[in-house]
Amino acid sequence: MTVRAGIVVTGTEVLSGRVMDRNGPWLSEQLLELGGDPIAIIVVGDRPQDILRALRFLTEEGCALVCTTGGLGPTADDLTAAAVGEFHGRAMVLDEALEGRIAEILRPLMGRWPNLDPEAVLVSNRKQAVVPEGSEILEPVGTAPGLVVTPAVGNGPTVVVLPGPPRELQPMWRAAIMNSPGLQQALHGAVEYRRDMLRLYGIPESEIAATLRAAETAGIELERLEITTCLRRGEVEVVTRYEPDGAGTYEQFAAFVRDRHPGTLFSDDGSTVDEQVFALLRGDGSRPSETIAVAESCTGGLLAARLTERPGSSEFVRGGLVVYSNEAKVALAGVDAQLIARAGAVSEEVAAALADGARAALGSDVGVGVTGIAGPDGATEGKPVGLVWLSVSHRDGRRVRRSVTLPGSRADIRDRSTTVALHLVRRLLSGDTG
Amino acid sequence: MTVRAGIVVTGTEVLSGRVMDRNGPWLSEQLLELGGDPIAIIVVGDRPQDILRALRFLTEEGCALVCTTGGLGPTADDLTAAAVGEFHGRAMVLDEALEGRIAEILRPLMGRWPNLDPEAVLVSNRKQAVVPEGSEILEPVGTAPGLVVTPAVGNGPTVVVLPGPPRELQPMWRAAIMNSPGLQQALHGAVEYRRDMLRLYGIPESEIAATLRAAETAGIELERLEITTCLRRGEVEVVTRYEPDGAGTYEQFAAFVRDRHPGTLFSDDGSTVDEQVFALLRGDGSRPSETIAVAESCTGGLLAARLTERPGSSEFVRGGLVVYSNEAKVALAGVDAQLIARAGAVSEEVAAALADGARAALGSDVGVGVTGIAGPDGATEGKPVGLVWLSVSHRDGRRVRRSVTLPGSRADIRDRSTTVALHLVRRLLSGDTG
C-alpha cells in the first residue's frame, strides 16, 4: 500500500522565480523511497490564504501526509507555522523551553555579526518559538524548529513543517524519520517500493520509446512496472518503480534494454557517470588508481569543478588549466601557437594538445582537453556555435577523442560538454568502446 | 488590475526529484512582469488525472490564465495535450499540416542519429501533431508544438501548453507574447507592475526585518509596497513589487535602506555582483578595462566558470589555475613550498601568493586567490570546515583580502566562496570599502 502525500513549498522568492526550489524534489524522492505516493509539489507565496488553499487541495486529494518547506524564518513574511496551526484548528502558543533552546543556538552565531541589532535577534528568536498548541517539535538544525501537526479534531493529513534551507531541512527530515512518532504514524503500513534506474548515453529519447513498445510486444508485462524516461544533461534516464513482487519482470525488462542498447547503456545500478569516473580513478584490486588533470577552454572551469564535487577527489584530481585565451593555451598548456593558427583553437589537434598539456603541466596519468564554441558569438565558417572538440589522453599513449555539436544556450553547451568529457574519460579508463 | 495565473509543471521525472524544474519559476517571473498574479506552481506527474486535478484547482482559485510545461514529447507518458483537451471539452484531432511541418523539422535531425529507428520517429512525429480541436498552435521551436486552449463551451482559464525543454519553452513563450491572440486576450487589461530589487552583502536577514520595522515606524507607507526578502548565495535580496503610483513610496523606502546600510547595500538597480564585476572589468570612459585571472583551490574551477558565464567574458578573463594539490600550487601558481609548509595551504599568505601567481602565470591586471576547506573532511586544529581565505591583488600593488567561515554543505561552501571572491574583486576595482 502507498500513502498519498503532498508537498507545499512556501516562499514568494521561490514562487516569483528568484530562488530555485531544491526541497520539493528532494522530499518527493524521500517519500517515494518510503512508500509514499507524492501526487503534487505546490509552490505558493508567503500569503497565508494561498498556503491554506494548497493544504485544503491536498487534503481533498486524499493525502494522508503533507510536508511544507520554508516560511519558518525570522521575517514577518514567514507565516507557515501559523497557517498550518489555523488549518488544523490549533492556537499558536509560545513554547518557552523551545525559546530558551533557540537562544542557546543563537548566542555563538551573534559573534559573527558584530553590528547585529540584539533587539532584532530577540524578536525573531521569540517568533520562531511560537508554535501550534500540542504539536510535535522537531529540534532546530539551524535556528528554526520543525513541527509535526495533526488535526485538533476530526480527520486530516499529518503536516510535517520543515525549514527552507536544505542544509537544515535534510538533517531534520532524516532525524524525523528515525524519531518522530507523528511522521512514523503517518507512514505506517506503507510498502517500500523498489526503484531502479538505467542510464544511457548517446541515443535520443525516441529510441527508448521504441524499445518500450518492443518490450511490450516481446511479452514483458510492463503494466507491472511504473516506467518513466527523461533526458537529463545529455543522458537518457529510465527509472522504474515497482512493488517487490515485480522484481522478476523488472529483470526481464532490464535485460531486454541491455540487449538492445549494448553500446549506449552505461549504468544499470543507479551510478552516475561522475561516480563511475570517480571509481575508475580510485582504482581497485584489479586496477591501479589514476590521477587526472584538465585543460578546458569553453567550459571555463566547469569540468574541473565537476571532477572536484565529491569529497576525496583531491586524491585523484591534480588540478586544471582554464585556458580561455589563446595566449593561455600556449603559455600554460604548451600548445604550439602555430598549431592554433593552422588548425584553429577549436580543432581536434588543439583538443589533443590541451589534453597532453594538462598531463604535462600537472604531472597526471590522464589529461582531458576541451575546446569549443559556447556562443552565442564566435561561430565561423564550418564551425557553428555548439561545436566542441574533446580529447582524453593517457600517460601510456592511449587516447580517445570526439567532436560534438551541442544544441541549446551557452549554459547548456558548457554543461553538456562536461558530460561528454566524463563519458570519454570513462571510455578510456574502462576500455569500454561504447 | 492583475490577472490571476497558475502554472502546472508536468513530468514524473520532475515530481520524483530527478530533474530540477526551471520552467515554473521562469514563467512565474514572466507573468509577474506582465501584470499577472501567479498564485501557485503545481508540479504533478505524468498521470492525466493529476494534471486535470491541478487544472481544476487553479480554475476554482479563479485563475484566468494557466500555463502548462512538459508532457509534449514523443513518449507514451507525454499526455499533457490530451489532458488539456479533455479539460476544455475538445476532441483530439490530427493536424496534418502541422504533421508536415514537424516532419520538415525532423528530417535534418535524423542525420545526427545514424542508428535511428525511422518508424519510431514517424510515430512520435504523428503523436506530436495530434492537438485539441480548434486550439491555437504555437509553432515548434524544437519538434513539439505549443498550444493555446480555451473552453469549448462556457468559462474557464485560457491554458497555454508549452514544451518542457527551457530552450524550446522560452523562445516559444516570447513569440506567443508578441503574436498569440489567445494569450494576449487572456492578459488583456493587466497592469504592468513595477519590480525593483535591492541587494545587500554581509548582513543577516534579521537585520532587514529590523529595517522594515524601522521604516514603518518612520512613517513610510509600506502597505503600498509588496516587499519580500530572501537570502541567496550569501546575499540578501529585497524585492519590491508595486503599482506605478507607488513609485514615490518605493523611493522613500530605497533611500531609507541606503541610509541604514551604506556599507552593505551594493545594488539598487537589479544588477548582480557578477554584472558589476563584468562592467568594472570592461571599463568605460572614466576607467580602463582590466584583465583578470584566478588561482583557486577549494572552489575547484567554479570561480573561473562563474567569471566566464557571460558572453564576451573572453575579453577580460585570461584564464585560471585550478590548483587542487599543493604540488600544483607550487608548479603552476609559483607558491613557495616552504610558505605552504609554514603557513598551511589554507592561509592568508597562500591566498595572496595564489592571487599574485595567477596574475604572473596569465599576465593579467587582476589576480584572485582562493584556498579553503570545503569539507566534509580536512578540518585541522584552528581551521574548521568552511574556513576560506581569499585575496585579490592588482598589478599596481593594490590588494584586498579576507577570510570567512562559511556554513553548509561542501557544495554550499564552494558556491558561497565564489560570491565572496566576486565581492572582493568588486571592492578592489570600484574602490568601494564596503
Image (cartoon, coloured by chain):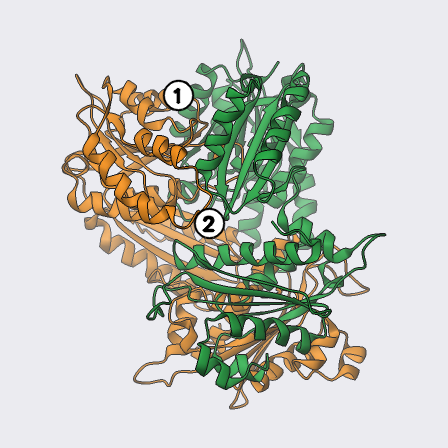
Chain colours: A orange, B green
Asked if residue B6 can be seen in this view, the reply is no
The x, y position of residue B382, in whole percent, is 35, 67
The secondary element bearing badge 1 is classed as helix
Chain where mark 2 sits: A
Relative to the observer, which residue lies in front, B248 or B23? B248
The secondary element bearing badge 2 is classed as strand
Residue drawn at (34%, 71%) of the image: B380
Residue count near mark 2 (Cα–Cα under 10 Å), binned few <14, some 14–19, many ≥20:
many
Asked if residue B430 can be seen in this view, the reply is yes
Q: Is residue B365 above or below residue A8?
A: below
Judged by depth in the image, the label closer to the viewer, 2 or 1, is: 1
The x, y position of residue A253, in whole percent, is 33, 56
Report the amino acid beneath label 1.
Answer: Pro
Report the amino acid beneath label 2.
Answer: Cys
A207 displayed left or right of B31: left
Residue drawn at (29%, 19%) of the image: A87
Name the residue that disc number 2 marks.
A230
Name the residue that disc number 1 marks.
A48
Alpha-carbon span between mark 2 and mark 1:
35 Å
Query: Which sits earlier in the primary sequence, circle 2 or circle 1?
Result: 1
